Amino acid sequence: MSTVSANASVMDGIYRHQRHIYDLTRRYYLLGRNDLIAALKPPNGGSVLEIGCGTARNLILTAERYPDAKLYGIDISAEMLKSADANILKNRIGSRVSLAQGDATRFAASALFGRSSFDRVFFSYSLSMIPGWEAALHQAMQALAPGGELHVVDFGQQTALPGWFGKGLKTWLAKFHVTPRETLGDAMAAIAADHHGELRFSTLYRDYARIGLIRMPQA
């Protein structure tokens, strides 16, 4: 079995049943997702790609906030995409949203969606589940249009919270193959420098979460 297939099987195993209650339970601890969506601000008629779109919760909220945007989402889990398709149909935005199964570290946007670049690309609590998360960041940068922005929100290191809280959270997250990326800020800084981009990076809720964006220069 290939690495891609193995990762997809792991995710499908986790979400085959969890996908039915995912949004109900995650709302209480996936903090900062709405902050990321508010910061996207794509240009009129612009394109937005979510990598690791899950149930399409974020894409639906993005569609509501930016009614002129064209939306795209990929996920490695076929099980999660079942929920995403159903939610998009329920919200009657199928004409604006395109979904595809793909690996965040090696997808070909042109093959999946018929376009190679996007005005905004974002990860929302997905990098902590992607084994090759740094490769996923590099891949996302390749999908950005000139002047585009890469947005990320994910778990922080809980440095300003009680030690028992951070330790307990990480132990619990590990049960779901989630590993907060301690060097996320450093990785984004290096990528921004390599691409002559502008980085903004900060912590949220006493470092419960970390949020950042890389803005690319115009061509």
Image (tube, grey):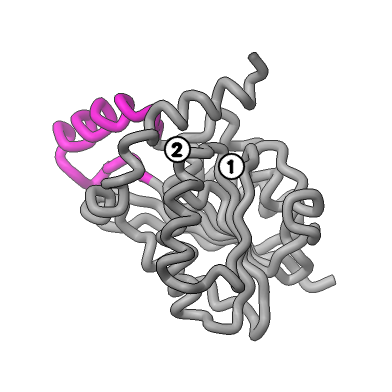
Residues in magenta, as a range? 155-179
Amino acid of disc 2: Ser
Q: Secondary structure at mark 1?
A: helix
Residue indicated by mark 1: 187
Q: Residue at x 45, y 78 (%)?
A: 64
Tell me residue 202's x, y (percent).
42, 58
From the top left corner, tell me how far across and down residue 140 is, in percent: 67, 50
- Residue 156 in the magenta stretch? The answer is yes
Which of the pair 78/38 is nearer the observer?
78
How far apart marks 1 and 2 lie (CA) works out to 13 Å
Q: Position of residue 88 (x, y in %)?
A: 47, 64
Residue visible at 19% across and 30% down in the picture: 168
Left or right: 164 in relation to 166: left
Judge the density around disc 1: few (<14), some (14-19), many (≥20) Cα neighbours within 10 Å: some
**Vertical placement of residue 92 versus 170, above or below:** below
Give residue 112's mark. none
Question: Residue at the right extreme?
Answer: 219
Is 113 covered by the magenta stretch?
A: no
